[in-house]
Amino acid sequence: MKDFRSQRLSRKILIFQAMLVLSVILAAVLGVWLNSTGWRLLWLLLVSGIALYVTHSYTQSHFFDPIHSILVSINRVTQGDLDERVFLRSAGDPEFVELSEAINGMTEHYALLVEEANRHRNHLNAILSSLVDALIVVDKELKITLVNPAAVHLLGISPDSQGRYLLESVRNYDLVQLFQRVLTEQATAQQEIQLFSPQHSILRAIVSPIRSQKTGKVLGVVAILHDITELKRLEKMRTDFVANVSHELRTPLTAVKGFVETLLDGAWEDKEAARRFLGIVSVETDRMVSLVKDLLELSRLEGTERAGTQVPVDIVELVEEIGESYESRAAEAELQFYLEIDGQPPAVLGDATLLRQAITNLLDNAIKYTDPGGRVWLTLTSSGEHVHVAVRDTGIGIPAKHLSRIFERFYRVDKGRCRKRGGTGLGLAIVKHIVEKHQGKIDVESEYGEGSCFTITLPAFVDVEDLTAAASN
């Protein structure tokens, strides 16, 4: 094929040269016939002009025009126009036709490669964008080459940080040192990193070297940063929970064991002392039973996403029943009790037993931590789409620094006073879980020495039939 193309091109060159030779011979022969010098000069100029014109036309149509068309198309392709193709005006030059076809084929193949590369890049970007963990890639000079959106959010770096040094974007010496160590040792490393900006976070960093597939040399470092802040918080809560449960159970068990041993040592013969000791044992046993009961209730609430029974609950009837039952208890504690219901609040969707438990827990705390002569309010209001149940008292109140933690398990503002009044430290945690199971929220306002107000906000239940009737009207 190559020899055939060479022979064909050689024939074209020979034809072009033969045309020039014939033109010169013809001009010479005709020039001999002309006797006048002026006519000879004119004839030579005319023949030269014709030869130049023929030469220019031939070379322009057979060489320069195809080459120009090919160059224009190649320039457009290199500028990104992958739809550009070479089209020759004249199809009489097989060499340039074959060259244009080869260029067009190469362009189509290049377009397919670019399309495939774009598809892979979009796929990679989608994967990086959907990653929950932060990903950072740096080169051997610790310059950032790639970051995903999770890294931008977690580390507070700029999305256009590519090309910058790692230390310029991430102000954390431990993390930068970990990257540097992996580059030096050329081995994967793991480490827990604490960040203090933009917010305090605890990260588990897994950093690995990036190696060339051909040479095996280290080209950079890739790091996956997993946010374990919540996990650490839960671990601390679990540790504190076990410690608190152990402490809460150890105190009454120690008392029970001590008084039982005292009775066994002979104190049971003294009836008055024995009765007093057994009374203490009974109180401490009740305290342990109450603690275990609250623990089981809290565990049951944490194991479900929603309240057990989802039915419309007449909140007005429920609050009235609770109010009537607590009037006598407030009187026994020498407190004034007020039940206030504003209008006719709508029903709520939920579990009546759990809602009763949440409200009674708040009332128990209000009565328990309000000194004789104080006042307790149970109010029910509505604001269109929500129902509000509030328990307010004039008790000892809660200092402002404790308000953010009072719903934690076993958290007590005054441990000695709370334990003396019989609290387990789980009541408010149970209330919060019950309210959250009903898609509601609980708020607290308190001033130390002035009293507290706990407000439960629940979504109102709207009957579909009532909505249909209202729409038709």
Image: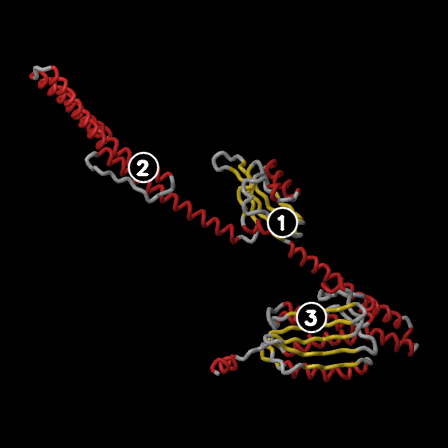
Please give the residue where the numbered disc 1 appears in the rendered image: 204
Residue 426's place in the image compared with 140, above or below, is below
Which residue is depicted at the point 65% across and 84% down? 317
Residues under labels 2 and 1: Cα distance? 55 Å
Mark nearer the N terminus (3 vs 1): 1
Quarter of the rendering containing residue 73: top left
Label disc, if present, on residue 67 of the rendered structure: none
Residues under labels 2 and 3: Cα distance? 78 Å
Please give the residue where the numbered disc 2 appears in the rendered image: 72
Residues under labels 3 and 1: Cα distance? 33 Å
- For this rendering, which residue is in front, 416 or 320? 320
Label 1: which secondary element: strand
Residue 169 placement (x, y as % from top left) = 60, 44
Mark nearer the N terminus (2 vs 3): 2
For residue 181, side relative to residue 10 (left or right): right
Residue 380 placement (x, y as % from top left) = 67, 79
- For this rendering, which residue is in front, 189 or 176? 176
* Label 3 crowd bin: few (<14), some (14–19), many (20+), radius 10 Å: many
Quarter of the rendering containing residue 419: bottom right
Q: Is residue 195 something that shows in the picture?
A: yes
Label 3: which secondary element: helix
Residue 86 placement (x, y as % from top left) = 28, 39
